[in-house]
Image: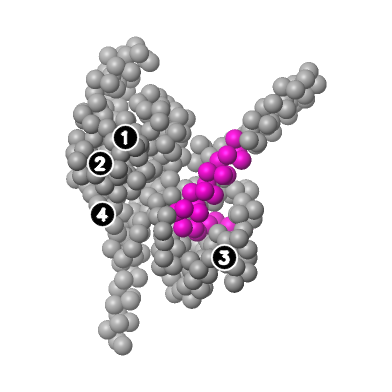
Amino acid sequence: MIILLDAMGGDNAPDANIKGAVKAINQIEAEVLLIGNKDIINGRVKELYGKNDISEISNRLKIHHTTEIIEMTDIPTQSIKHKKDSSMVVGFNLLKEGKGDVFISAGNSGALLTGATLLVGRIKGIDRPALAGILPSYKSRLMLIDCGSNTNCKPINLLQFAQMATIYNRNTFGMEKPTVGLLNIGTEETKGNDLVKESYKLLKEKAEELNINFVGNVEGRDAFSGNLDILVADGYTGNVFLKTVEGVGKLVKNTLKDSIKKNVLTMLGAVTAMPLIKSLSKAMDYKEYGGALFLGVKKPVVKAHGSSDEKLFEFTIKQAEQFVKNKAVEKMIEEFEKVDNQSNKIENKS
C-alpha cells in the first residue's frame, strides 16, 4: 500500500507533514510518498534529523518531486486547472492512475474538494461528495457529515450524506444500524429553516428503504450523549459546529492546565489525579481521530486540518491506512450500485 501525502499543504508545511510521516512510519505497514519539492523537503530533513535524504530515516519514506504549490489564498478551480505540477494536483493524478492508494492533504480546502471531484470523480449515483469528520463522544465516537465541503445544499444531499455515513459506519465499525440525527435548533419536526424541514421529511420517508436508522432532529447540546453515531448537516452549519467543538475542547484543556498550576495544593492533588486528567485530555482531543474522510469519490481521499501539527498528521496517516484496509470506497460503490439497480427495476416495472 502507498499513502500519498501532500507535503506542501497546510499552515505548518512542510515541517509538520514530514514529522508526522516520520512518527507514523513505524506504526503502519504502508509506504508514505511525500509529494512536493524534493530540495525543500530534504533540506528540512537535514535540519530536523541530520539526514541528507528522507529515505535514510526509513526505506518506506520516499519523495515524488513537484515544483508548484497551491496556496491557501488561491482560487480552487483556477489552481487545479493551471497548477498542473502542484503537490495537490500531482497527488490526485497519482491516485487516479493507481500509483497510490489514498491521498492526504491539509491544503486549500476548496481546491482539494474541486480536485477530488473533477480529477478523481464521484461515485455513480452520488450528487455531492461530503467531508465526514470523526469527533469524540461519550463512550463512543460521532461522525459529522458534512463538515465543510458543501455550503449550499438540497434535501437530497443531506439524505445521501446520511446514506454514505451509514454505509461507512456499518462496514468499517460493524454497526448494524448506526443512529442518524439531523442537526437542528430543536427536536420538533416543525423546527428549523426550509432546508432542514424538507430534509427531515425526506429522511423520514426514505429511511426504511435506504436502511438509514433515522432518529430525528438533534440539538447541538445532545450530539455527544453517546446515543448518536452520525450527525447530518449542510457543510456551512457542520463546519461552524465542528470548529466550535474544537474551540470548546481547547478551552477545557487550557482551563484544566491552569487549574492544576494554581497553587501547591492543586499541583499535589493533580499527581494522584494525573491518570484521570490524561484520560480526559485524550478523550477530548480531536487530533486523536485524524482528518475528515471525503466520502462519495471513487478513491480514498482524506482532508487533514489546515492547522495540522505533527501529531495530527501522524494520526491521519494511520487513519488513512485503515481507510484503505477497510475497503470503504469499494463497499460504498457496491452499495450505491445496488440502490441504482433497484431504482431502475422499479422504473421499468412502472
Question: The residue under label 3 is which amino acid type?
Answer: Gly
Residue linked to disc 4: 121
Q: Position of residue 144 (x, y in %)?
A: 50, 52
For label 1, count other residues whose C-alpha is less than 10 Å away and answer few (under 14), some (14-19) or many (20+).
Answer: some
Q: Which residue is nearer to you in this view: 103 or 324? A: 103
Does the image show residue 4?
A: no
Look at the image and give the residue range highlighted in magenta: 227-250
Residue linked to disc 1: 71
Determine whether label 1 and label 2 are within 8 Å by CB: yes
Relative side of 200 to 34, left or right: right
Question: The residue under label 1 is which amino acid type?
Answer: Glu
Determine whether label 1 and label 3 are within 8 Å by CB: no
Residue at coordinates 29% horizontally, 16% vertically from top-left?
A: 43
Q: How far is the residue under mark 3 from the one under mark 4? A: 33 Å
Q: Position of residue 308 (x, y in %)?
A: 44, 33
Q: For the C terminus, which image quadrant? A: bottom left
Q: How far is the residue under mark 1 from the one under mark 2? A: 9 Å
Determine whether label 1 and label 4 are within 8 Å by CB: no
Residue linked to disc 2: 79
Asked if the magenta segment contains residue 339, the reply would be: no
Say what secondary structure mark 2 lies in: helix
201 above or below 84?
below
Q: Which numbered marker is on residue 192?
A: 3
The secondary structure that most of the magenta stretch takes on is: helix
